[in-house]
């Protein structure tokens, strides 16, 4: 039982670690106007998917249906058009209009995403700690019997 809880928490920690890294990349590239693919950096986002946990330790089908682990579905690029900013002195400015294609990244939104991903990671880490304590307590009780 405890190992399934640890597996679920570990999957949440792993998925949120990738989300934190992706958000950090978005923030770091919020002003990147030139990429290897050409054009400005495109914001990325992580999608999560829930998967059923297979276990024989729960006899009730409802209990089994309630157990889910999280995994990363994919990392997707934002399809929104870049922001056009007037900056004729910028090296990537259009020669005629002086407009520069900038990444469509809102740093405040990204910071909010970072906070929520960090909180989810910390919550899963706390589940791991509490599960370890409970497992240790149960073993202690059985050792005294």
Image (cartoon, helix red, strand yellow):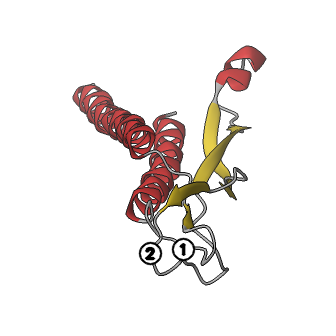
The answer to which of 7 and 77 lies nearer the viewer is 77
> On the rendered structure, is 91 left or right of 64?
left
Eyeballing the image, is 34 above or below 69? below
Horizontal side, residue 68 vs residue 131: left or right: right
Instruction: Between residue 104 and residue 1, name the one nearer to us.
Output: 104
Q: Quadrant of residue 110?
A: top left
Residue 63 at x, y percent in the picture: 67, 18
Q: Are marks 1 and 2 in contact (CB under 8 Å)?
A: yes
Q: Residues within 10 Å of mark 1 (few under 14, many from 20)?
A: some
Label 2 sits on a secondary structure element that is loop
User: Exactly how many numbered labels are in the figure?
Assistant: 2
Give the distance between the C-alpha atoms of the residues marked 1 and 2, in whole angstroms.
5 Å
- Classify residue 37 as left or right of residue 136: right
Would you place residue 28 above or below residue 90 in this image?
above
In percent of the image, x 50 and y 59: which residue is there? 86
Q: Quadrant of the C terminus?
A: top left
Quadrant of the image occupied by residue 70 = top right
Q: Which mark is residue 90?
A: 2
Which quarter of the figure has residue 138?
top left
In the rendered image, the vertical position of residue 114 relative to residue 82, given as above or below: above
Label 2: few (<14), some or many (≥20) within 10 Å?
A: few
Q: Position of residue 64 (x, y in %)?
A: 71, 25
Q: Residue at x 42, y 52 (%)?
A: 20
From the viewer's perspective, is 50 left or right of 134? right
Residue receiving disc 1: 93
- Residue 78 is situated, as x and y percent measured from the top left of the image, at 67, 53
Q: Secondary structure at mark 1?
A: loop
Residue 82 percent across, percent down from the top left: 63, 56
For the point 65% across and 46% down, which residue is it? 47
């Amino acid at each position: 039982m405890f190992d399934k809880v640890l597996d679920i928490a570990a999957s949440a920690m792993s998925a949120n670690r990738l989300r934190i890294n992706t958000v950090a990349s978005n923030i770091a590239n919020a002003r990147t106007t030139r990429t290897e693919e050409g054009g400005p950096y495109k914001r990325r986002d992580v999608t999560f998917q829930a998967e059923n946990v297979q276990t024989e330790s729960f006899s009730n089908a409802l209990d089994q249906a309630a157990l889910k682990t999280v995994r990363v579905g994919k990392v997707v690029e934002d399809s929104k058009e870049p922001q056009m900013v007037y900056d004729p002195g910028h090296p990537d400015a259009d020669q005629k209009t002086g407009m520069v294609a900038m990444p469509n990244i809102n740093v405040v939104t990204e910071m909010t995403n970072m906070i929520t991903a960090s909180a989810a990671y910390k919550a899963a880490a706390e589940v791991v700690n509490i599960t370890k304590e409970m497992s240790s307590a149960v073993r202690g009780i059985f050792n005294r019997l």
